[in-house]
Amino acid sequence: MVKILRLSFINFKMSIKDFRTIMFMFITPLTVILGINLMVSKGDYTVDSNIAFNVKDKGTYGEEILKEMNISENIFYDEEDKALELLERNEVVAVYQIPEDFTEKIKNGEKPGIQSFKREEGNTTLAFELNLEDEINERIRDEILLKNGIIGDRSELLNYRTRTKVINLNENKVDSKFALAMMMIIYFILLSSSSMGEKMVGMKKQNILSRAMSTANAGYEILGSLCLSIFVLQVAVNLAILFTAKIIIGFTITSFYIALANIMLTSLFSITFTMFMTRVFEEQGVVSFAAIIFSIASIFLSLISLKSEVFPKVPFVIKNIGKITPTYWLLDSVKTLNLFPNAVIVLLMIAALFSAGSYKLKSFVNRV
Amino acid sequence: MSLIEVKNITKRFGHKVVLDNITLTIDEGDVFGLIGPNGAGKSTLIKIMTGLWDSDGGEVIIDGYDLKKEPLKVKEQIGLVPQEIALFEGITAYDNLEFFGYLYGLKGRQLKERIDEALEVTGLKDRRKEKVNKFSGGMKRRLNIACAILHHPRILIMDEPTVGIDPQSRNHIFEFTKRINKENNTTVIYTSHYMEEVEMLCNKVFIIDLGQEVAYGDKKSIKSMISNNDRILIEAFDYRREMIQAIKQLPGVNECIEEKGLIKLLADKNSFRLEAVLKVIESHGGRIKSINFEEPSLEEVFLALTGRNLRD
Ligand SMILES: Nc1ncnc2c1ncn2[C@@H]1O[C@H](COP(=O)(O)OP(=O)(O)O)[C@@H](O)[C@H]1O
Ligand SMILES: [Mg+2]
């Protein structure tokens, strides 16, 4: 064990000598995190101010819902022409018309239709529409609960509402910018399998591994120390990225332990994954290409699974396929601040991959 | 007991037999030459002897340790200079040495001293801070050697250390090999397809071709395999004419001719006595300037034994 630590130390020292690689490891994810953060915050702004409403509702629910959603601009009352004029002048991207029977339908437990006018198809208003739908559904649910006597009166409803709010608050405690930064970090660690695999195959091709094998060190000591040094480097660099992003963007690291645990798990996974890839594929190019494809696909599928409510039309299988990727459980762990069962599941995946992918250094070196 | 015992080593790649029942022993302090043309199986034998490859039969015992059972005990004693350059290209010579020094279990001041020493003996001291990818082929070869001697191995194995390099680096490697053997009593195994090199450096030789032993033993005995005659060149003057006839009468002398003041003798190894010749020359008033034994080169040996030239 002491031997592995000693050898890890020299491997680590070697890798930090290549200063450019380290900077690349640090700068790229950081730039992307900052860039995306900028884009997302801008996006929020435009959606809110670029929508107009025409309220024809005879009751009060329409108005109330808009208020609850913190919308106060561009609201017209039965003035369809004026609202549509804004759309024509390109000042808004969409106009929503709340119908006369809006309140009535909700009271009857029915879903009211909302007409929308847009200049072109697009998804810039998607988030808003989903929010609106949530609000309406909530109202309908309240009405049904009241009507069927499940809840006695409105004050009880208020209790119930407050309780839901509390749960919501809990969920929202995770700073979304922190979650975003973690997502990108996880993504980039996975992506690094590509360069790691290249490095492994490179060390084999440069005969470094075979020379290492001629020294009085067991294969597992050589390979183990190499992996350990990569692990330490990855954890260190990515924590640095997280903290730098925190300082620049100004989010709160909701839970340092969750962040640390997930970075460590991702790194472990990506190292094991690299070993697996170098076992399966011989060529440097193929290893790194496969690693890139895997990283992109897994993050994409996990996002679909995590936000399945956003994609109502995506088939069930695709919605759930993300759950077989480690990324899903890692991101979910960041979102919910749960280490259990997520960490266990990821560890199991790592163990499975390890048993499938681990090999004797000798056979790796000697394979032509 | 010999330091290195290779017993009945066989290696196949598919149906192709690359090493066929190779047996040899090497004593401590030997400079052992393993020679043969390209593809003869030299590197394969080296890789098996250092535990990088498994053999399909036979055993390797070094210092009493069975390589298969106690590989690390064996590897501790070996410094391997692989035929293919094995270095990190993107970092400096010094950093390469530091890395491999760690693998040999060196650290701290001792490591620094050994690195300096290795740089010194391979003549790379001035270039230690340069990146390897800026090195010439010869310098890479020398660094390749430097990386294998940090732990002062008891056995230094060099697989074609002089392939494709400049004469200066080549001489450096020769001098180094002789020195490390003389000063540290390091046992050296030296493979090459250049006969002259092995001829110059080694006291024991194993000639291999197509995975089989062609000849094996100390240099003298190998050479005597192809001929029972010694060729002797004597430079002498002031002698009387009839001396040549008198030499011809001596036991063991098969032929004696005079050519441009040089007396050439072809004599039987077993019955010929040089003292007798010297006496005859003296008694005929001759004075001797030089005497040379002309041996067949290993190149000639290879040709005689295999019917082929070493290099095409
Ligand atoms: N990995 C391998 N797979 C198949 N054949 C091999 C392999 N390595 C070497 N050989 C064959 O073994 C023979 C001996 O090769 P080698 O030991 O490298 O020769 P040398 O070092 O004497 O030039 C050659 O014919 C070569 O083609
Ligand atoms: Mg060879």
Image: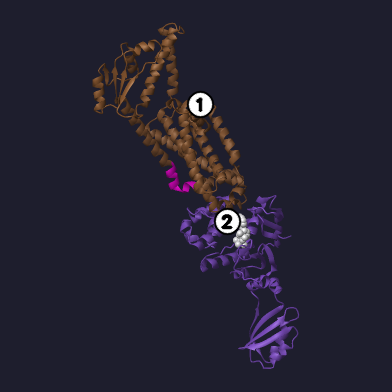
Chain colours: A brown, B purple
Regarding residue B78, the answer to whether it shows in the image is yes
Dot 2 amino acid type: Leu
Please give the chain letter of the residue carrying mark 2.
B
Q: Which element is circle 2 on?
A: loop
Mark number, residue B150: 2
Give the magenta part as a residue range: A15-25
B262 or A301: which is nearer to us?
A301
Residue where numbered disc 1 is placed: A338
Viewed as shown, does residue A131 lie left or right of A78? right
In magenta segment, residue A16? yes
* Residue occupying the point 56% across, 58% down: B84
Mark 1, residues whose alpha carbon is within 10 Å: few (<14), some, or many (≥20)? some
Percent across and percent down for residue B298 are 64, 72
The nearer-to-camera label among 1 and 2 is 1
Percent across and percent down for residue A15 are 49, 47
Viewed as shown, does residue B216 lie left or right of A335? right
* Residue occupying the point 47% across, 33% down: A301
- The dominant secondary structure in magenta is helix
Mark 2, residues whose alpha carbon is within 10 Å: few (<14), some, or many (≥20)? many
A210 or B65: which is nearer to us?
A210
Please give the chain letter of the residue carrying mark 1.
A
Dot 1 amino acid type: Asn
If the picture is divided into quarters, which one holds ligand 2? bottom right
Regarding residue B106, the answer to whether it shows in the image is no
* Residue occupying the point 52% across, 28% down: A339
Q: Is residue B116 above or below residue A359?
A: below
A8 or A163: which is nearer to us?
A163
Q: Is the residue indicated by label 1 positioned so its CB lies within 8 Å of ligand 1?
A: no
Percent across and percent down for residue B265 are 68, 84
Locate the N terminus of chain A by quadrant.
top right
Cα separation, mark 1 vs mark 2, equals 51 Å
Q: Are marks 1 and 2 in contact (CB under 8 Å)?
A: no
